[in-house]
Amino acid sequence: MTPDSDDLEQQLREKLKLRRELGGLEEQLQQNLKLRRELLTTVAKARERNAKDRLGWAIYWTFLALAGLWVVICLWGLYGQSSGVEYAIEVFMRSPFEQLALMGIPALMLYSLGRAIRYALSRE
């Protein structure tokens, strides 16, 4: 063999070695890309769920405030009469269950509706 062929053979071996190294790097880059895609998918799902949870809590607190407002309006209707507190106590004592139902049932329904919507949005 001539010295030129030894040099060519040596260069060929170096090129093959570099190609193997580049092939390994390309494989690692593909794995990295796959992991990034999986991470982006996971983050997107977490953000979507977080948004649903926040919306559910906002609706829950809105309905809870409406329930409280209903009770305040009912009490204002009783105590806001010109006759005062004595009249309100008299009306309440005449029909306590009716007054509690007038205040409690709509308030409980608003609370339950808000709770159900929050539950439906927070679950998948």
Image (cartoon, grey):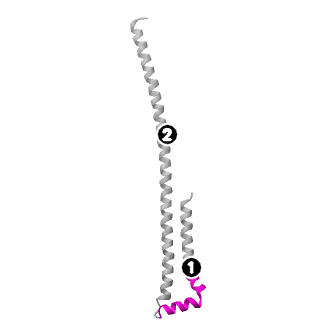
Which disc, if any, is residue 104? 1
Residue 98 painted magenta: yes
Which badge, 2 or 1, comes first in the chain's sequence?
2
- Residue 109: x and y, percent? 57, 74
Q: Could you say which is closer to the camera, residue 10 or residue 56? A: 56
Q: Is residue 17 above or below residue 115?
A: above
Q: Which secondary structure, mark 2?
A: helix
What secondary structure is the stretch in magenta mostly built from?
helix
Q: Amino acid at mark 1?
A: Gly
Residue lying at 44% horizontally and 27% vertically, measured from the top left: 22
Which disc, if any, is residue 37? none
Residue lying at 50% horizontally and 92% vertically, measured from the top left: 86
Residue lying at 51% horizontally and 76% vertically, measured from the top left: 67
Q: Which residue is disc 2 drawn over?
A: 34
Q: Residues within 10 Å of mark 1 (few under 14, many from 20)?
A: some
> Could you tell me how far apart the alpha carbons at marks 2 and 1 are, in whole angstroms?
56 Å
Name the quadrant of the N terminus: top left
Name the quadrant of the C terminus: bottom right
Q: Is residue 44 above or below residue 12?
A: below
